[in-house]
Amino acid sequence: MVENAGNKLPFMKMHGLGNDFVVFDERESGPVVTQALVIAMADRHMGVGYDQLVAIRNHETADIELVFWNADGSIAGACGNATRCIAGWELAGTGKAVLSIRTERGLLEAVDAGHGDIEVNMGQPMIDWHKVPLAREMDTLELPIEGKPTATSMGNPHCTFFVDDVDAINLEAFGPTIEHHPLFPERTNVQIAQITGPNQIRMRVWERGVGITLASGSSSCAVAVAAMRRGLIDGPATLTLDVGEIRIKLLPTGVHMTGKWAHVFDGHWRGIR
């Protein structure tokens, strides 16, 4: 990352399958990210534009700590694509075989899977109603919402609908109604998913605090978990998003997510004038 220059804050722009991020490395500078900065930079016309903003921090018991914000300034407890991107950057730069990452979700591990792919163990899914969380006790396999979606937490809440044709859904209208549904006290990410073949899933994503995104790592994990629980897949799955694929394995050690990552450019943030 480029060096600090005066009052300009250095950052990286990254993306995982078009799900894009701004990344601040606070390991030497100390905290620089504020909610006001998050909101200002997120504007795609007057700022930089991104789906999530991430701060890299030092941690006593892990190689790095990651803190995530959504574009609306709210905290995101997990972000799989950003975790994979930063893991790719750190593994390439340090030569480590395994990278340990502390997040609000817990301690995660990442490895280089070869061919430009990074594999991240996103930890165990949480399917109890109070851990998603939901507003009241119920079975999370089929929620009492039209379409009978499945609720999952990967450190952030997810609501997955299985449909016959994902492209027939007006996600721009549908997404916010589910994000703000009263069953989800902390709002929720929304996925619409279609089984397209054996262990093959096409999905689209509405992210809490962001809107429609081209991809989502934690959403991909949640969809695979929901599909396995409902008997729709029976092994490692390939999820096709708007601009690429993520591979998910559900193992005793956790939900393993593998996919591409990209570092787009380095820049300096001067602030809104």
Image (cartoon, rainbow, N blue to C red):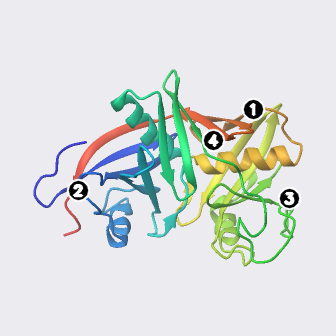
The x and y percentages for residue 191 are 69, 55
**Residue most extreme to the right:** 231
Residue ID for mark 1: 236
What kind of element bears circle 3? loop
Q: Position of residue 203 (x, y in %)?
A: 69, 46
Residue 41's place in the image compared with 112, above or below, is below
Single out the mark in the foreground, 2 or 1.
2
- Of badges 2 and 3, nearer the viewer stands 2
Residues at marks 3 and 1, CA–CA distance in whole angstroms: 20 Å
Residue receiving disc 3 = 141
Q: CA distance from mark 4 to mark 1?
A: 16 Å
Q: Closer to us: mark 4 or mark 1?
A: 1
Q: Which residue is mark 2?
A: 29
Q: Is residue 160 visible?
A: yes
Give the SS element for disc 4.
Answer: loop
The C terminus appears in which quarter of the rendering? bottom left
Q: Secondary structure at mark 1?
A: loop
Task: Name the kind of residue labelled 1 in the image.
Answer: Pro
Q: Quadrant of residue 90?
A: top left
Q: Answer few, some or many: residues within 10 Å of disc 1's Cα (few below 14, many 20 plus, some between 14 and 19).
A: some
Q: Count neighbours of disc 2 (C-alpha within 10 A) and say few if under 14, some if 14 to 19, many if 20 or more.
A: few
Which is nearer the N-term, disc 2 or disc 4?
2
- Residue pictured at 43% horizontal, 52% vertical: 65
Question: Mark 4 highlights which residue?
Answer: 241
Residue at figure coordinates x 83%, y 62% from the top left: 140
With 222 as the anchor, is 19 left or right in this view?
Answer: left
From this view, report whether residue 45 is shown above or below residue 165. below
